[in-house]
Image (spheres, grey):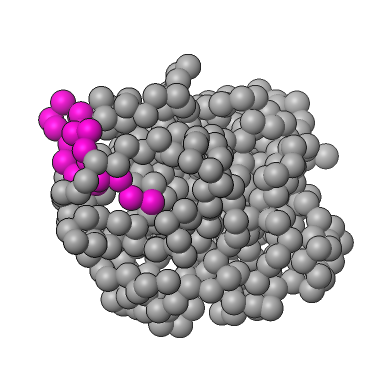
Amino acid sequence: MASPTNKKLYTNGRPHFPRLLIVAVLLLFSVVHCTRGVPPPDAGPLPAEPARDFDRLFQRTGDGWTGGDGTLSVKLPDGRSIWLFGDTLLGSVSPDRTRPTDAPFIRNSLVVQNGATLETRFQSHSGIPSAFFTPPSDQEWFWPGDGTVEGHQLRIFLHRFERQAPRLWAWRWAGTHLATLALPALTWIDTQPAPSDNEVLYGGCILETEHYTYVYGTQDRIFPKQAHLARTPAGRLQGPWHYFDGRDWTDRSQGSAAILGGVSTQYSVIQARDSFYLFTMDGRMPFSNEIVVYRSGRPTGPWQGPQVVYRAPDTGPQVAAYNPFVHVQFGENGRVLVSYNLNHTSDPAALYRDADIYRPRFIRVDLAEVDRYFDQIRP
């Protein structure tokens, strides 16, 4: 893998019509039922509201990133945050929120936030923008998962996909890797295969505690999709890993057992006080616009829920919401910042007619209200 150079603020490139943006969305939608559910009580108003400040921050008109999905973030030791995006649109956006049809399209990008300033990082070859993380071949690409800081390095999970034939849908997940970047410059050091080999997409979410780093993954080639969990001593993400087998931890990856059924391909788990919260789209119905949360006293479950925390208002028959993720560094007054992504489900040209379709939206969720709900249904 060639070493990426840290480039920024490109606004030109050859046309590259992103048909696979739509494919990426359908991969990440959860259209399954949840295996642990309870009849909800009358919980009153939903415990979330739009985060207008972050919505405005990511409504970009040029100078780098103007649209993308994935929308994970990692807080860096110097106070900056790095945002991790998969399929990314660059270039300019007109005042009427349209973008030119030759807007550059790349497979992944980094966006570095320093206060209210966003700086886009990607590569360039002969003046043509390309992905920050370069895959092994032209028939493959990387979509980032979660990341974490270990010492003076940033480690980022990369999910590798490969094209099997020159037609739509003829592609598949081919493995998970760990990329290492040097801090604070964010220069690429290397990319290595992740420790696991059990057909689970690990690294969609990382949960860090004092003693362990928990790595959540999804078994998405079965129905319904299943959440799995591995862990490693804190600061040793490269392994060895141990896997939760339903009762205890084993060094056998094939012994991993599902901790929750019916999750999205990508979801988010955080710890607050003595509880753990799992955020995902509600997959019990196709193309649900509901973000739900589960609660547990342990990172392994069992899980209470789901509780609906938000219904995305900007969805419709052909615009869907997906991939909720919690950004803990931006919490305030007991409310956590959660992003979700939007995309058109059938018409790639819609992303050019309306640049607001393909960018994240943000909400803040009141965890005290979430706890109040779960306390009502506790046996």
Q: Quadrant of the C terminus?
A: top right
**Rendered image quadrant of residue 275:** bottom right
Q: Nearer the viewer, residue 333 or 170?
A: 170
Q: Quadrant of the N terminus?
A: bottom left
In the image, which residues are magenta? 89-107
Q: Nearer the viewer, residue 210 or 98?
A: 98
Q: Residue at x 46, y 26 (%)?
A: 345
> On the rendered structure, is 345 left or right of 358?
right
> On the rendered structure, is 306 left or right of 352?
right
**Rendered image quadrant of residue 223:** top right
Q: Residue at x 53, y 57 (%)?
A: 160
> On the rendered structure, is 200 left or right of 75?
right
Numbered marks: total:
0
**Rendered image quadrant of residue 89:** top left
**Can residue 267 be seen here?**
no
> On the rendered structure, is 183 left or right of 345?
left
Q: Main secondary structure of the magenta part?
A: loop
Q: Residue at x 20, y 29 (%)?
A: 98
Q: Nearer the viewer, residue 351 or 150?
A: 351
Residue 288 highlighted magenta (yes or no): no
Q: Residue at x 17, y 54 (%)?
A: 10
223 is higher (above) or lower (below) than 138: above
282 is higher (above) or lower (below) than 198: above
